[in-house]
Structure formats: structure tokens, C-alpha cells
Image (cartoon, rainbow, N blue to C red):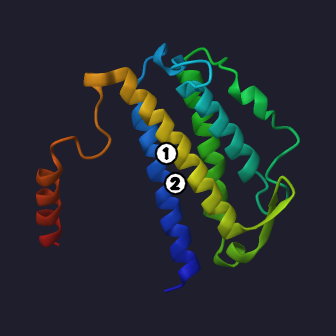
Amino acid sequence: MEIGKEYLRVVMERFISVKRLGDKTLNQLSDEEIHWNYNTESNSAAIIVKHLSGNMVSRWSNFLTSDGEKEYRDRDEEFVDDTTTKAELIAVWEKGWRVLIETLTDLSEADLLKYIFIRGEKHLVLEAIERQMAHYAYHVGQIVYVGKQLKDNNWKSLSIPKGKSEEYLKEMLERHQDK
């Protein structure tokens, strides 16, 4: 087994898993709810999506050959809630993920030990991938939290529903015994 290839496979699965959490949350929110925020210091789902997408396009475009903070990126504009519809927001969301996934798919095991720059700071590719994973999981977690607040009793759980842990564990054990 080649550890670098296995790492790239696993990290791709993790990014896709994080994306699915965001997808499932955004699917539960209405056009109005994507713009809700608790107060002026908190961000709506729409703003978080814009920020994530802006970061992804900047970081993952020309990943191995240019600084991850592109000159064209306007990070401050990402925090302006100017998307009008959920469909528009989903297009922004998908654009960022598409750039990330295409770039990650093209990486080789040898690329993991190369150096790239983010805001002039040198990072191993491996380190940069982990940095972005933590950043995206953090923000998708915020989107999920906002979704739970908004949907309350109408929230459709993204994992094991409350009070169903034993039932889930039993089901998983039975499933794996059959293999």
C-alpha cells in the first residue's frame, strides 16, 4: 500500500463527507432562512457559503504554482450577504467544491511533500490540505448549527438522531457481521 495514495483517497472522502453535511443542511433551509443570522456579529448560512467558496477557489486554483491567496479574491466582500436566492447560493457553493475536488483529484503522492504558499507562508501540500479540511469542517459545522436553530423540531438529523444511539449501533454491528 502506498501511504500517499491512501491518504489522498481518505482525505477526498472526508472533504466529500463535510460537503454532504452542508448539502443536507442547505437543502432543509428556505430562501429566507439562508439569510438568517443571530446578531450582527454572526454570519448567515449564505455568508458562510460565500466565504467557503471564495476561499476554495482562491486556495485550490493553480494550487501547486501560485500563492493560495489570489490577488482577485475580495475576502471582505465574502461577508456581504448579497445572494438573492437559494439556487444562486447553491451555484456559489458548488463552484468552490468543484475547484477543490478537481484539484485534489489531480494531486499525486509525490505532490504531498511539495511546498506551496498561502499569504506568503510556506506549507507542505500535506499541511495545506489539513489546514483547509479544518477550516471547511469548522464553517460547515456553523451552517449545520444555524440550520438546527432555524428548523428546531423540523430538523432532519444528519447523523444518529438523539435517543437512537443503541439502535444505530446494533444496526451497524449486524450489517458488518453479514460481510
- The one nearer the camera, 55 or 119, is 119
User: How many numbered discs, if any?
Assistant: 2
Is residue 26 visible to the viewer in this orientation of the structure? no
Which mark identifies residue 19?
1
Q: Is residue 23 above or below residue 59?
A: above
- Mark 2–mark 1 distance (CA, rounded to whole Å): 6 Å
- Measuring 64% from the left and 77% from the top, which residue is drawn there? 109
Q: Is residue 72 left or right of residue 96?
A: right
Indicate the amino acid at tag 2.
Answer: Phe
- The one nearer the camera, 168 or 92, is 168
Indicate the amino acid at tag 1.
Answer: Lys
Helix, strand or loop at label 1? It is helix
| In contact (CB < 8 Å): disc 2 and disc 1 | yes
Q: Is residue 86 above or below residue 109?
A: above
Q: Is residue 175 left or right of residue 160?
A: left
Q: Position of residue 63 (x, y in %)?
A: 76, 58
- Measuring 15% from the left and 42% from the top, which residue is drawn there? 163
Density class for disc 1 (Cα within 10 Å; few <14, some 14-19, many ≥20) is: some
Density class for disc 2 (Cα within 10 Å; few <14, some 14-19, many ≥20) is: many
- Residue 110 falls in image quadrant: bottom right
- Residue 74 falls in image quadrant: top right
